[in-house]
Image: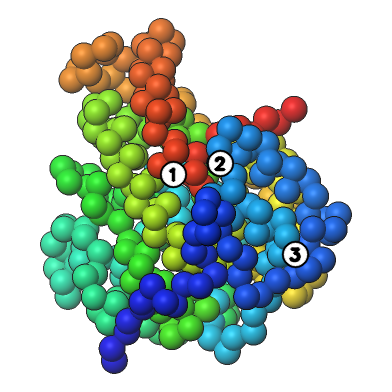
């Protein structure tokens, strides 16, 4: 099987000046849907200091998430940096969608047969990814008590947390190859996970995913640029942006628009999603509590010290603030719970 995807396959997400065009599919009631209004308001707050017209938000507000019929199983793929909520969403969508996967190795060359080779690089060709993902789906489907008509894959963050060694900046799924399987193996959609990038980078540093500030900011920079560029090849109605702090502060506002995106036709599934989201608001991130000493850091030695933490946070934040124009979709740090 030869799988190819040319630029001509992307008429729905091209740039016209500084705006992204709307897709061929549109729910004309989205702009007046009161059930979406709080989510849309949150998005306007989140992207208050970003070029919002370079994101999919205007398309959401005008066309929502129309259902496009497909006989293929739905694959919802999580796209986000380290610490942006992959594990949280794995829990939230359990019992909402048929199958939930996490930290699988079918997107990369982590294994060769039964041997772990630890390159972490994504498959070079879409045909190899097709074979690997089809085999994974068959295995999971056969071992699951549900038909796996809907799959949520929170594979891991960009980059992978599984592979912790030099060069891990390149250890992430190939979004172009994944998109080439849309309409071939799956009906593919993307849950875009956004979080204050400075908090995420400091979290990665505190959990020793990176060894110093330079590695923390450069790893995040490269992955943000990659995700932003790759997602421009996906129609807006196939994406849904969720901000970590928004999820924690106002989960109820996500229920209806997220249900439309996930194509939840059953009231039972919607109710499970609502309960899961409400439960998530009762929990807070523990990342800032998991802080360690770093003898190799030159600015200060321990993130458990409030002064050191603030100094590191400011250095990283200043770096990202100068570069957020490079990843507008993932630069939405403006959410205010008030």
Residue 255 point in image, percent of width and height? 74, 56
Q: What colouring method underlies this structural image?
A: rainbow
Q: Is residue 203 visible?
A: no
Q: Which residue is mark 2?
A: 51
Residue 152 point in image, percent of width and height? 52, 66
Task: Establish if 171 lies above or below 250.
Answer: below
> Gap between marks 1 and 2, in whole Å?
10 Å
Other residues around mark 1 within 10 Å, as few (<14) / some (14–19) / many (≥20)? many
Q: Which residue is mark 3?
A: 270
> Gap between marks 3 and 1, in whole Å?
32 Å
Q: Nearer the viewer, mark 3 or mark 1?
A: 1
Q: In terms of depth relative to the viewer, which is nearer, 323 or 267? A: 323
Q: Horizontally, is 269 left or right of 90 in the view?
A: right
Q: Which residue is mark 1?
A: 327
Q: Secondary structure at mark 1?
A: loop
User: Which part of the image, by quadrant, shows the C terminus?
Assistant: top right
Q: Are marks 1 and 2 in contact (CB under 8 Å)?
A: no
Q: Nearer the viewer, mark 1 or mark 2?
A: 2
Q: Is residue 234 visible?
A: yes
Query: Residue at 44% across / 77% down in the picture?
Result: 9
User: Which part of the image, by quadrant, shows the N terminus?
Assistant: bottom left
Q: Horizontally, is 14 left or right of 37 in the view?
A: left
């Amino acid at each position: 099987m030869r799988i190819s995807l040319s630029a001509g396959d992307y008429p729905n997400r091209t740039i016209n000046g500084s705006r992204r065009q709307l897709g061929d599919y549109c729910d004309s009631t989205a702009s007046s849907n009161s059930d979406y209004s709080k989510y849309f308001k949150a998005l306007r707050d989140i992207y208050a200091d970003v070029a919002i017209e370079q994101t999919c938000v205007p398309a959401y507000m005008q066309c929502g998430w129309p259902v496009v019929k497909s006989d293929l199983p739905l694959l919802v793929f999580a796209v986000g940096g380290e610490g942006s909520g992959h594990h949280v969403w794995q829990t939230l969508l359990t019992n909402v969608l048929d199958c939930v996967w996490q930290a699988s190795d079918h997107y990369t060359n982590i294994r060769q047969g039964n041997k772990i080779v630890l390159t972490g690089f994504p498959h070079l060709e879409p045909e190899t990814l097709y074979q690997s993902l089809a085999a994974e789906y068959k295995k999971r489907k056969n071992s699951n008590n549900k038909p796996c008509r809907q799959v949520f894959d929170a594979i891991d963050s960009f980059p992978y947390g599984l592979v912790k060694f030099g060069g891990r900046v390149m250890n992430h799924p190939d979004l172009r190859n994944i998109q080439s399987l849309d309409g071939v193996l799956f009906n593919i959609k993307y849950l875009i996970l956004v979080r204050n990038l400075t908090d995420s980078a400091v979290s990665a540093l505190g959990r020793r995913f990176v060894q110093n500030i330079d590695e923390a900011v450069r790893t995040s920079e490269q992955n943000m640029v990659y995700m932003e560029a790759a997602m421009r090849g996906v129609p807006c109605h196939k994406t849904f942006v969720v901000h970590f702090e928004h999820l924690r502060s106002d989960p109820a506002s996500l229920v209806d628009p997220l249900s439309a995106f996930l194509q939840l036709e059953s009231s039972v599934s919607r109710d499970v999603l609502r309960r899961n989201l409400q439960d998530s608001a009762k929990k807070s991130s523990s990342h800032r509590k998991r802080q360690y000493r770093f003898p190799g850091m030159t600015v200060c030695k321990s993130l458990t010290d409030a002064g050191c933490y603030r100094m590191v946070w400011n250095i990283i934040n200043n770096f990202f603030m100068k570069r957020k124009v490079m990843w507008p979709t993932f630069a939405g740090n403006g959410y205010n719970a008030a």
